[in-house]
Image (cartoon, coloured by chain):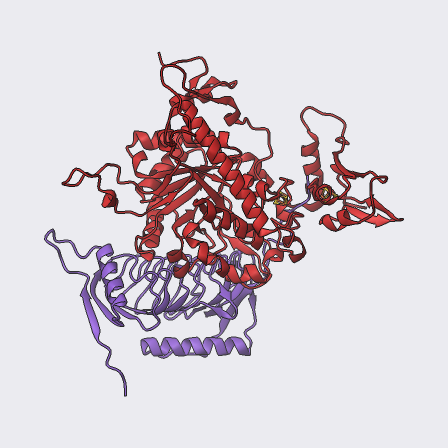
């Protein structure tokens, strides 16, 4: 009996043999072994994942990658994806792994939201002529303005430290290990050039990156990998990771193959062992416990850096957020259902959590009701794809947005969802030297800088068009949004009026 | 010629106008300032539950003596120096310790030594649940936890490296609870006394002691005896617990492209 059933191929490169000059670049490019050279020709083997690295490398445009017909009899309920996953599980008996964000057809609420613009009764602002402020402050706010004896605003009145960024954007936490040294270097350099923050992810900080620490936010996750007092004191803020939108309630798991020298040194674990982050922090089973970790991090950093908490957007997110602010977090990050990951069980990635649009609005409203909103910086992440998503997310209540996948796309990622296999042909989600060397740090840095610069310009355009001169005035300004989707109940929950409803 | 080391004393129980003892923030600030000013020997008197004492201390020459009961997270992120407690410690002592030494002349609470990767912790008495969770080692340097009495469930869960020794003094039966070494993928646990298979968590197994193990245990007992001026009977049989695999999730996942 042969227990293994092959799953039909999904993609197939087609080679135009007339255009092909037999340079074999595509064969070298393919890290999935889907191309081979036989009988003086480039031939197609199995396993193409449509990463299109071969297309990029081919000097004569001789390759097209096609999606193959589904190879299954049509059925309205048992989709080809479902059948493929069942066949695979019957083969392996394993928990299906995947990467990138949820690849399921949940409603994309950002696409159902329209922005307002100024007409006649309130003039728009021309950002070329008048300044539109996009500076963003991250940290705990005093919640009030303190005026000194001379009538001047006392800027030092806030006891807690603040990080100033030039844009309301933070590059999210992507660990060294999940991505390559070159990829992380590019993200960090871009953050430095843009004067925004980048998250370190949970793998600690490589020695080479310490000079950029002032633009970095250190992640303290349940594995505490690479977390030392020195590290905590160097960075500009510290983030306690409770959860991640792509895998709420799940721990981290960096397979031993990826724990090579560089990673082992940074994470401070032996070569080749699995780097496992327990599902919960075992010192945090309650809000009171969380308060302790926040406090001990503040003590350890001598109250010089903001300490935040990042959670996945789950159904009770409003109440949890309230607890987190009360526990002393200076900033709070909510990561939505569609957020990315380098590796997560498919069942969690696609089925657990809630979309960031709803979560950020729910948290903003809840904190407002409880008089806590002014105290804390609210960051939102989880598939903020474009400047439009960013702007809508800010108007729904976020002070800052966290962005990962789009920054990876700027570097070359094609969202092929193979990160967990560690053979990223673009040199991003891999530790194999022959692949990581494909990513040029300088070019990648410049591309990320360009992209976020463009987003910030688009933000100014929209702010100007709305007649708003500072991004802070857009935060939670849900009156400038209208809902146009199929389910008015969502509009109600978002606290956004339906398109067609005016002010009165 | 030995250098005279001056001792600085802080009265942590000193009451303010409202009758409150020193706040933990104030106490820790005083400690940091003293260390910064070059003080090497600090004695904290009447400590009454103040948390986070000496967190992130890094100077290897610092010696902090604590009289009373320090609160949770004593010596968190410790990176050097010695903390000696003449009393009991509470929860999460030595949280993510990187280096240095903590000596407790009493019991310590739950989650002792969480995620520590270096340094030494000696507890004269017993400890609570979840001791030594996710402790690690790197390049031959790992944390060492020695508990004189017994510990409760989940000892060494998710352990990735390092050494735990449970001496089981005053215990007739097994000095460890259930789920020992669940998800363990590195390091070693020595128990002076019996451990049965049903007490182990998934991923852990019992193994024979070898010469190297006896040497490790002897060195740790020497340290314990010296720290607490006691003598330990070394003739009792040890149980040794190690991971089945450095990759406990092998075969658990299917990474096929769907
Ligand atoms: S490089 Fe990518 S797209 Fe090209 S054949 Fe290989 S897997 Fe397919
Ligand atoms: S990082 Fe690499 S493997 Fe992951 S989705 Fe992007 S291109 Fe594919």
Q: Residue at x 39, y 50 (%)?
A: A238
Chain A rendering hue: red
Q: Is residue A47 above or below residue A304?
A: above
Whether residue A464 is visible, yes or no, is yes
Q: Is residue B43 above or below residue A88?
A: below
Q: How many marks?
A: 0
Q: Residue at x 47, y 47 (%)?
A: A193
| Outermost residue to the left | B17
Q: Residue at x 31, y 48 (%)?
A: A161
The image quarter in which residue B97 lies: bottom left
The image quarter in which residue A327 lies: top left
Quadrant holding the C terminus of chain A: top left
Q: Position of residue A6 (x, y in %)?
A: 77, 41
Chain rendered purple: B
Drawn side of residue B194 relative to residue B224, left or right: right
Q: Position of residue A139 (x, y in %)?
A: 34, 43
| Outermost residue to the front | A129
Q: Position of residue B252 (x, y in %)?
A: 62, 49
């Amino acid at each position: 009996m042969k227990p293994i059933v092959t799953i039909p191929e999904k993609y197939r490169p087609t080679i135009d043999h007339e255009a092909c000059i037999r340079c074999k670049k595509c064969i070298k490019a393919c890290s999935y072994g889907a191309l081979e050279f036989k009988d003086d020709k480039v031939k197609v083997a199995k396993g193409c994942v449509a990463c299109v690295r071969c297309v990029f490398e081919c000097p004569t445009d001789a390759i097209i990658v096609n999606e193959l017909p589904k190879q299954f009899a049509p059925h309205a309920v048992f989709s080809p994806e479902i059948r493929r996953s069942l066949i695979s599980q019957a083969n392996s008996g394993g928990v299906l792994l995947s990467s990138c964000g949820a690849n399921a057809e949940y409603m994309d609420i950002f696409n159902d939201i329209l922005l307002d613009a100024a007409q006649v009764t309130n003039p728009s602002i021309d950002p070329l002529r008048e300044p539109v402020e996009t500076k963003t402050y991250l940290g705990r706010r005093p919640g009030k303005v303190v005026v000194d004896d001379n009538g001047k605003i006392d800027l030092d009145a806030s006891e807690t430290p603040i990080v100033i960024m030039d844009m309301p954007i933070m590059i999210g936490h992507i660990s060294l290990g999940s991505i390559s040294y070159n990829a992380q270097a590019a993200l960090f350099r871009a953050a430095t050039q843009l004067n925004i923050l980048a998250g370190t992810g949970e793998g600690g900080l490589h020695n080479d990156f310490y000079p950029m620490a002032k633009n970095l936010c250190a992640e303290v996750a349940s594995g505490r990998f690479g977390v030392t007092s020195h590290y905590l004191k160097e960075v500009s803020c510290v983030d306690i990771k409770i959860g991640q939108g792509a895998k709420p309630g799940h721990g981290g798991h960096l397979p031993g193959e990826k724990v090579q020298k560089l990673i082992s040194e940074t994470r401070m674990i032996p070569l080749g062992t699995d780097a496992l982050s327990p599902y919960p922090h075992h010192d945090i089973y309650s809000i009171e416990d969380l308060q302790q970790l926040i406090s001990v991090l503040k003590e350890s950093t001598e109250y010089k850096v903001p300490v935040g908490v990042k959670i996945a957007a789950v159904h009770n997110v409003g109440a949890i957020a309230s607890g987190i602010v009360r526990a002393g977090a200076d900033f709070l990050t909510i990561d939505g259902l569609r957020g990315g990951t380098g590796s997560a069980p498919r069942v969690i990635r696609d089925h657990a959590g809630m979309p960031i649009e709803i979560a950020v609005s729910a948290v903003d409203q809840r904190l407002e009701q409880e008089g806590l909103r002014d105290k804390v910086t609210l960051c939102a992440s989880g598939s903020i794809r474009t400047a439009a998503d960013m702007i809508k997310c800010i108007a729904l209540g976020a002070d800052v947005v966290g962005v990962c996948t789009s920054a990876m796309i700027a570097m070359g990622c094609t969202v092929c969802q193979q990160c967990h296999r560690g053979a990223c042909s673009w040199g991003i989600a891999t530790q194999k030297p022959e692949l990581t060397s494909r990513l040029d740090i300088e070019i990648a840095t410049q591309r990320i800088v360009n992209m976020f610069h463009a987003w910030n310009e688009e933000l100014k355009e929209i702010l100007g068009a709305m007649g708003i001169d500072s991004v802070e005035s857009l935060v939670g300004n849900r009156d400038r949004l209208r809902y146009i989707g199929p389910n008015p109940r969502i509009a109600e929950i978002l606290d956004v009026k339906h398109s067609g409803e005016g002010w009165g | 010629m030995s250098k005279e080391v001056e001792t600085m004393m802080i009265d942590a129980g000193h009451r303010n106008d409202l009758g409150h003892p020193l706040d933990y923030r104030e106490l820790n600030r005083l400690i940091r300032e003293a260390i910064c000013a070059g003080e090497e020997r600090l004695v904290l008197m009447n400590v009454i539950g103040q948390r986070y004492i000496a967190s992130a201390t890094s100077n290897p020459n610092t010696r902090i003596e604590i009289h009373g009961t320090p609160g949770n997270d004593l010596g968190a992120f410790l990176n050097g120096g010695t903390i000696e407690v003449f009393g009991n410690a509470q929860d999460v002592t030595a949280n993510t310790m990187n280096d240095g030494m903590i000596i407790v002349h009493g019991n310590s609470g739950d989650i002792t030594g969480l995620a520590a990767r270096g340094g030494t912790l000696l507890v004269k008495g017993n400890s609570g649940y979840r001791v030594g969770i996710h402790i690690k080692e790197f390049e031959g340097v790992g944390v060492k936890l020695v508990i004189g009495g017994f510990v409760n469930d989940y000892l060494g869960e998710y352990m990735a490296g390092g050494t735990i020794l449970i001496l089981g003094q005053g215990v007739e039966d097994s000095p460890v609870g259930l789920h020992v070494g669940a998800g363990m993928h590195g390091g070693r646990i020595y128990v002076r006394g019996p451990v049965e298979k049903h007490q182990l968590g998934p991923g852990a197994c019992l193994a024979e002691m070898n010469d190297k193990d006896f040497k490790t245990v002897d060195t740790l007992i020497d340290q314990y005896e010296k720290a607490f001026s006691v003598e330990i009977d070394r003739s009792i049989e040890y149980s040794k617990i190690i991971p089945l695999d450095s990759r406990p999730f092998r075969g658990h996942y299917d990474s096929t492209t769907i």
